[in-house]
Image (cartoon, helix red, strand yellow):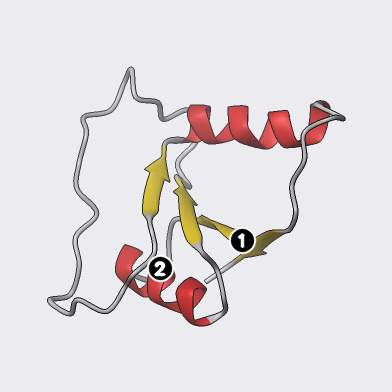
Amino acid sequence: GKIAVIERGECTFVDKARRAMNAGASAVIIFDNVPETSITNQPPFAMSGDGKDDVKIPTCFLFTTEANSLKNALNIKSDLKVRELIVLNY
């Protein structure tokens, strides 16, 4: 039941997902490391892999604006239940 929240950068998306999965995460949210990006000002893109089919957990990407909404919700909403949140920096 752990969801890894990881900042973009330093290695590939699939490497981040693979490392999170191997650390016990059940899903991954990767957020952008470029300030002020949003679904309204950036084109959609696919997080590509490396040809291996070994990542078995859901993985998604959030631009900075949308990621900030998630981070703010976790900080502000006192009745929001999070069992465990792992922030990994790769």
Q: Position of residue 56 (x, y in %)?
A: 33, 70
Q: Which residue is mark 1?
A: 1
Q: Examine the rendered structure and indicate whether residue 18 appears above or below residue 32.
A: below
- Residue plotted at (39% across, 76% down): 18
Q: Which one is in front, 63 or 76?
A: 76
Specify few, some or many for label 1: CA neighbours under 10 Å numbering under 14, 14-19, or 20 or more.
few
Q: Position of residue 48 (x, y in %)?
A: 19, 60
Q: Amino acid at mark 2?
A: Ala
Q: Amino acid at mark 1?
A: Gly
Q: Nearer the viewer, mark 1 or mark 2?
A: 1
- Residue plotted at (20% across, 41% down): 45
C-alpha separation, residue under disc 1 versus residue under disc 2: 15 Å
Specify few, some or many for label 2: CA neighbours under 10 Å numbering under 14, 14-19, or 20 or more.
many
Callout count: 2
Secondary structure under tag 1 reads: loop
Q: Which residue is mark 2?
A: 17
Q: Examine the rendered structure and indicate whether residue 63 appears above or below residue 40.
A: below
